Image (tube, rainbow, N blue to C red):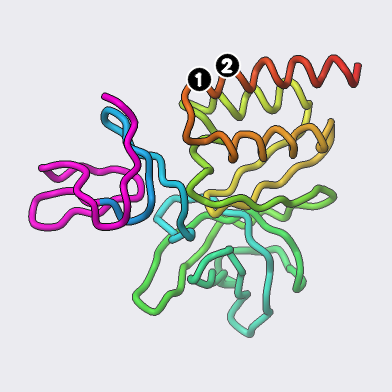
Amino acid sequence: MDKKIVLPGDLVADKPVKLEGCFVENGKTYAAVVSVTQEDRTIPLKGRYLPNYGDYVVGIIKDERFSGYSVEINSPYEGQLSNRDTREEFRVGDVVLVKIMAVDEVNSAIVVEPRRLTGGEIIEIESVKVPRVIGRSGSMLAILRQYTETDVIVGKNGRIYLKGGNTVLATLAILKICREAHTSGLTDRMTAFLQNESKKVN
């Protein structure tokens, strides 16, 4: 099946199918955002992050409250971290990795399992490009870590934490992945790119 660009509202499948960037209505599947479709998958090209249960996201402590903390998670939703879910004390501006535990109807997301991220750098990409940065079964992420020797933590919300190794090369590689996310053969091209660039450094 050839690649095809679909717009929001375009029919993707005549049956209900769970696809990224799509919704089901009256037993049919439609695109929710501009996407590229190929075979049995879609690759969204644009879209804001909407939290889902189980997602790990990179957030920033926004405010300290009596009951806990509010966490900015690069989303219309605001993260809420209860004092009951952490023994650690945080300050406004701290960068944390948290897990989405629940989402309510008033644009609030309950987050748990906070882990402070210190001494690194943060870059932001469109959240719809995150699956490409991770790759199938983590293949792209493994390549990034191997050739840059950087600790790379990818939040589902499009925030990526980089620490150690060649963070400049890691950043260049991630931005290249995002630019070419809709193309095929990306893993092979990125492997060649990272091999060549890492040789220049060494």
In the visual, does 97 lie left or right of 50?
right
- Image quarter of the N terminus: top left
Q: Is residue 85 left or right of residue 30?
A: right
Q: Secondary structure at mark 2?
A: helix
Quickly name the residue at label 1: 185
- In magenta, the rendered stretch is 1-30
Is 136 above or below relative to 94? Answer: above
x and y percent of residue 20 in the render? 35, 45
Residue 186 versus residue 11 in the image, above or below: above
Q: Nearer the viewer, residue 91 or 196?
A: 196
Image location of residue 125, percent across then percent down? 61, 50
Pointer 2: what residue?
188
- The reply, left or right, for residue 176 in relation to residue 183 is right
Mark 2 residue type = Asp
Q: Residue at x 40, y 55 (%)?
A: 53
Q: Residue furthest bottom?
A: 66
Query: Are the residues flagged by discs 1 and 2 in contact, CB closer than 8 Å?
Result: yes
- Disc 1 residue crowd, few under 14, some 14–19, many 20+, Cα 10 Å: few
Residue occupying the point 73% across, 21% down: 194
Where residue 124 appears, as percent x and y from the top left, is: 66, 53
> Which quadrant of the rendered structure holds the C terminus?
top right
Relative vertical location of residue 52 with respect to residue 162 in this rendering, above or below: below
Indicate the amino acid at tag 1.
Gly
